[in-house]
């Protein structure tokens, strides 16, 4: 495969990975909420907990995604396998 195909597959894989992490975090936090907090929270406040769960799952997915991407950047020479998305690197003398 060439660099452009590698770049496209990496972006698609990373996007699917991020969506998977977000959905997993939502289900995990909803399960914790349903088992521990749902019966203790008034019905009028439950929608706020759902909103907090959604925001927390996005934050969790961001932290995990950044950690994995930083790990991959350290392990893989990105310039060797991937094309730049928005043009090449600019070197200043």
Image (tube, helix red, strand yellow):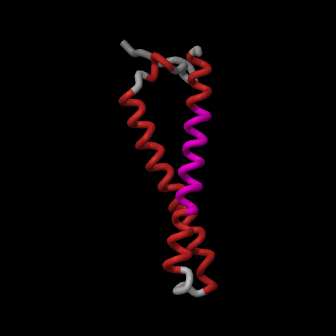
What type of secondary structure mainly makes up the magenta span? helix
Vertical arrangement, residue 60 with respect to residue 16, above or below: below
Q: Is residue 91 magenta?
A: no
Q: Nearer the viewer, residue 81 or 91?
A: 81
- Of 20 and 41, the residue lying toward us: 20
- In the depicted structure, whether residue 34 falls above or below residue 85: below
* Residue 67 pos. (x, y %): 41, 43
Q: Give yes or no for residue 20 being in the magenta stretch.
A: yes
Is 2 situated above or below 43?
above
Q: Residue at x 45, y 37 (%)?
A: 69
Q: Is residue 75 left or right of residue 86?
A: left
The spot of residue 82 in percent (x, y) is 52, 21
Residue at 56% over, 17% down: 3
Question: Which residue is pictured at 59% across the width and 55% down the height?
Answer: 23
Q: Residue at x 51, y 80 (%)?
A: 37
Number of residue marks: 0
Which residues lie in the magenta part?
A: 11-27
Res. 11 image quadrant: top right
Of the 4 image quadrants, the one containing the C terminus is: top left
Instruction: Give the camera-side residue of 86 and 62.
Output: 62
Check the picture and name the quadrant holding the N terminus: top right
Residue 79 picture location, percent across and down: 46, 19
**Residue 52, position in %: x, y?**
54, 68
| Quarter of the figure with residue 12 | top right
């Amino acid at each position: 495969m060439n660099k452009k195909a590698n770049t496209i597959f990496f972006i698609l894989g990373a996007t699917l990975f991020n969506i998977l992490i977000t959905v997993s975090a939502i289900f995990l936090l909803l399960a914790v909420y349903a088992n521990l907090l749902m019966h203790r929270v008034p019905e009028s406040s439950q929608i706020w907990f759902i909103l907090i769960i959604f925001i927390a799952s996005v934050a969790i997915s961001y932290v995990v995604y950044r950690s994995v991407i930083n790990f991959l950047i350290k392990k893989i020479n990105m310039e060797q396998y991937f094309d730049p998305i928005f043009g090449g690197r600019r070197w200043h003398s």
